[in-house]
RNA sequence: GCUGCUGUAGCUCAGUCGGUAGAGCGCGUCCUUGGUAAGGACGAGGUCGUGGGUUCAAGUCCCACCAGUAGCUCCA
């Protein structure tokens, strides 16, 4: 006889088989009808599940979850995912179910099925779902021992579920299933009592995915959808998405002439138009001043470097696939390189190799002593040696090796440390084509990069002040909606260089500084750079996708690889530690995010066009030019709308073009020696003398005042937005 | 890179059953000379992403490629 404690503190006794729904019914039928799930001792369970089974404790505390509890929404959505899967299985043959969890805004389900689903099929699927919902059949939970569960899924021809039971769930003795009419799915739950509880849902998109998220695995089709408690909330959500799309930096970048990407130049190669370039220049000027104050030294380095440099650093072998191929001085360079790669991968036939050999000969390679019949290692070594004797350059994918060389250009004493070398360094990466995204993911980017060379005892302090710099920079543009992530290595992976001791030391230092920094942070295993752990500042774009902006990285490995040294007080050589840091990350991504952050309505200090002068009629043009000249000499970016349009038109256009200040000049203003000021946000401010107007603008610029920021539609700091309901 | 979708004027988009292109905004010229979110008239602008194919005829149907996009995978 379980005793149940309700949120109001009352305790009641119920029969052994009683469920949360029974408890709800004992209070009232309407409550029972509204109950979607139950919170039993802090765990969410089916409302229809016997309480005694869900939790053995006595008394158990029970909270009935209705629309009022946001946790009920996740349960509702996951049930909706099952209903979608059921509809798909009714409409298509040969469906193999994968996973179907909820996400922060809805749910998806992955299917392996022979036919291709496109958005045109959504109405059919939605209609089928509506029918299932109308039938309002219950979700019924049952358990099977592991062996039987596997057999059961096999009988249902659910091979992916069988595989999951055999591998991912190998340590589970008993597995739960949910039956809903003819549809049965391996699932941890919980679910709503019956399908009829779903009042508003919509399929959103279809996309490809991979079984268990591995690109080497089977390709699946993923259907995305969402569900809400009522149609009104669903409509509001869809509206919000539409609204957010209007803030997309790619849309605004085009609309306001900030940047463009031309296919004639190349994929992922950003062209900064004058207005976008102005914003970027202002940001660069801003941070340059800050860096000088903080003891950084400027450096410049070229866009290419010898391949050997990146072999030493490890970048070249490690990121081979996402770099532009090396530039060879010899015409056969690419050919030999490809030949060598084929040998390394062991996929070459004798015929193919003869072909390579002949082609290389045609290109004037003297390979007469090529060990054709020798072991494959010898052949690889031969080609490698040939390559090493060639001029080989790499479009630089990273600035660190160049900066390392600058450090090495002079002997360093402990008295010189920290050495802080800063550069806006352009780097090139051949990102996968499907990854490119406006300014947020490009193939040519400019990092606001710097490398700090410090002694071991300076690491903590330098790391701390560097974090401060990132915080300062972000707050200067009003970016507060970020999440800090401590990206550590995955100890089980072999993709990291250096000893575990150094890694532990680096991660420990980083964690300690972060803990003392007052920044909330989350720890993410397997997210470190190959040479060291990092603190990453993550922000969300208008579609809710998360991107890394600023980063601070701790590196004990590159100094080792490049044999960096400084002379200590003991007159002996010591190894410095490197801190890599980029507060903006890249200028491209940062400006892209900033466009969305401000919805292109930049604060005065960043606005490409700060002031526009609008003449009342054409005869005001000379005075308008006079005002323009005065403001320009006061340091403002100011234009004159010289069109013969009426002032209403000029105002409307300036408003739509997001110019912060409009100065209307007419005969009255001219005779009084001033201007009529219109503020983009507050509207008409009336007449001001020119001096007063300049003073107002100047103080707004100097304080870098931010008067308006568009609220993001997406929650800022979600650590994870995927709740896995499947096993 | 993978899967789906998309590509028509500078921008946003329409274009039916295959019969060689339309709108609004913008732009240009002229008229209008105005006080805080659109004054009016006329006009110029397009190898319909590229290349093949089917057809008497292709923006429209088919194939390949290029690019964009959503998601997956990747991200120094």
Image: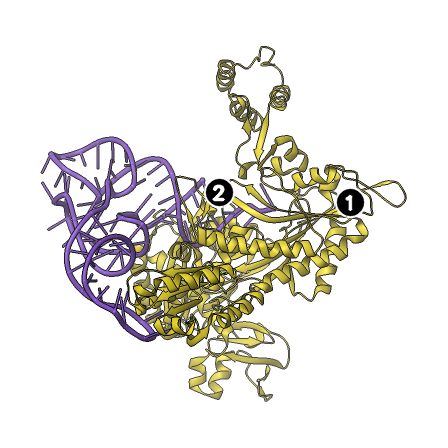
The answer to whether residue A335 is left or right of residue B27 is right
Q: Residue at x 39, y 52 (%)?
A: A95
Q: Label 1 neighbourhood size at 10 Å, few (<14), some (14-19), many (20+)? A: many
Residue under label 1, please give it.
Answer: A576
- Image colour assigned to chain B: purple
Identify the image quadrant of the C terminus of chain A. Answer: bottom right
Instruction: Nearest to the eye among marks 1 and 2: give it.
Output: 1
Residue under label 2, please give it.
Answer: A432
Q: Residue at x 61, y 76 (%)?
A: A41
Q: In which quarter of the image is residue A672?
A: bottom left
Q: Which mark is first along the chain, 2 or 1? A: 2
Q: How far across and down, in percent of the image, does residue A459 sit?
A: 76, 53
Q: Mark 2 lies on which chain?
A: A
Q: Which of A182 and A337 is in front in this view?
A: A337
Identify the image quadrant of the N terminus of chain A. Answer: bottom right
Q: Quadrant of residue A13?
A: bottom right
Residue A137 appears in the picture as rendered: no
| Residue A479 sits above or below residue A583 on the image | below
Q: How far across and down, in percent of the image, does residue A388 sit?
A: 63, 24
| Residue A556 sits above or below residue A666 on the image | above
Q: Residue at x 48, y 42 (%)?
A: A432
The answer to whether residue A577 is left or right of residue A102 is right
Q: How far across and down, in percent of the image, does residue A692 sit?
A: 50, 72
Task: Report, in whole angstroms, how far the alpha carbon at label 1 lies from the one at label 2.
Answer: 35 Å
């Amino acid at each position: 006889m379980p005793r149940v404690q309700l949120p109001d503190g009352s305790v009641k006794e119920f029969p052994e088989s009683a469920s949360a729904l029974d408890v709800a019914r004992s209070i009232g039928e309407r409550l029972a009808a509204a109950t979607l799930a139950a919170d039993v001792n802090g765990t969410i369970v089916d409302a229809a599940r016997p309480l005694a089974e869900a939790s053995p404790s006595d008394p158990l505390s029970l909270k009935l979850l209705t629309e009022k509890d946001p946790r009920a929404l996740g349960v509702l959505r996951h049930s909706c995912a099952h209903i979608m899967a059921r509809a798909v299985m009714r409409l298509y043959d040969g469906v193999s179910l994968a996973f179907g969890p909820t996400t922060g805004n809805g749910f998806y389900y992955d299917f392996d099925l022979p036919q291709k689903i496109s958005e045109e099929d959504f109405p059919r699927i939605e209609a089928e779902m509506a029918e299932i919902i109308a039938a309002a059949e219950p979700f019924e939970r049952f358990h099977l021992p592991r062996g039987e569960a596997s057999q059961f899924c096999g009988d249902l021809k659910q091979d992916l579920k069988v595989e999951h039971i055999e591998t991912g769930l190998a340590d589970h003795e008993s597995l739960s299933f949910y039956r809903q009419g003819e549809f049965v799915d391996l699932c941890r739950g919980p679910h709503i009592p019956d399908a009829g509880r779903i009042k508003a849902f919509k399929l959103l998109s279809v996309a490809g995915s991979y079984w268990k998220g591995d690109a080497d695995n089977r390709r699946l089709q993923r259907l995305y959808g969402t569900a809400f408690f009522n149609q009104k909330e669903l409509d509001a959500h869809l509206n919000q998405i539409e609204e957010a799309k209007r803030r997309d930096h790619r849309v605004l970048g085009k609309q306001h002439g900030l940047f463009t990407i031309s296919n004639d130049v190349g994929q992922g190669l950003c062209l900064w138009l004058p207005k976008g370039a102005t914003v970027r220049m202002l940001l660069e000027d801003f941070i340059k001043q800050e860096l000088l104050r903080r003891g950084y030294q400027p450096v410049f380095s070229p866009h290419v470097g010898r391949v050997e440099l990146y072999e030493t650093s490890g970048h070249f072998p490690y990121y081979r696939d996402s770099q532009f191929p090396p530039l060879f001085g010899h015409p056969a360079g690419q050919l030999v390189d490809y030949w060598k790669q084929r040998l390394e991968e062991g996929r070459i036939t004798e015929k193919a190799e003869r072909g390579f050999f002949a082609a290389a000969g045609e290109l004037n390679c003297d390979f007469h002593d090529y060990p054709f019949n020798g072991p494959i290692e010898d052949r690889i070594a031969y080609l490698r040696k040939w390559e090493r004797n060639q001029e080989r350059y790499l479009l630089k994918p990273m600035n660190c090796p160049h900066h390392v060389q600058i450090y090495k250009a002079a002997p360093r004493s402990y008295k010189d440390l920290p050495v802080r070398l800063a550069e806006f360094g352009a780097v090139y990466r051949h990102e996968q084509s499907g990854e490119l995204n406006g300014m947020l993911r490009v193939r040519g980017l400019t990092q606001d990069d710097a490398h700090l060379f410090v002694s071991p005892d300076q690491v903590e302090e330098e790391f701390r002040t560097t974090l401060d710099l990132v915080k300062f920079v972000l707050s200067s543009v009003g970016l507060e909606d970020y999440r800090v992530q401590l990206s550590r290595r995955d100890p089980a992976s072999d993709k990291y260089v250096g000893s575990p001791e150094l890694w532990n030391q680096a991660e420990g230092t980083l964690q300690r500084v972060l803990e003392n920094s007052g920044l909330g942070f989350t720890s993410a295993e397997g997210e470190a750079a190959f040479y060291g752990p990092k603190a990453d500042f993550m922000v969300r774009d208008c579609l809710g996708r998360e991107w890394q902006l600023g980063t601070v990285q701790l590196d004990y490995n590159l100094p080792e690889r490049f044999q960096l040294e400084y002379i200590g007080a003991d007159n002996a050589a010591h190894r410095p530690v490197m801190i890599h840091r980029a507060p903006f990350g890249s200028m491209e991504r940062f400006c892209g995010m900033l466009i969305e952050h401000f919805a292109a309505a930049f604060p005065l200090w960043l606005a490409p066009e700060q002031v526009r002068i609008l003449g009342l009629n054409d005869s005001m043009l000379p005075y308008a030019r006079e005002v323009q000249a005065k403001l320009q000499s006061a340091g403002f970016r100011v234009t004159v709308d010289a069109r013969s349009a009426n002032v209403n038109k000029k105002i409307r256009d300036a408003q739509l073009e997001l110019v912060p200040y409009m100065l209307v000049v007419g005969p009255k203003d001219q005779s009084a020696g001033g201007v009529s000021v219109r503020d983009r946000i507050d509207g008409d401010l009336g007449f001001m003398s020119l001096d007063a107007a300049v003073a107002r603008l100047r103080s707004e610029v100097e304080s870098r005042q931010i008067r308006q920021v568009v609220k993001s539609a997406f929650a800022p700091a979600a650590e994870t937005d995927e709740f896995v309901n499947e096993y």
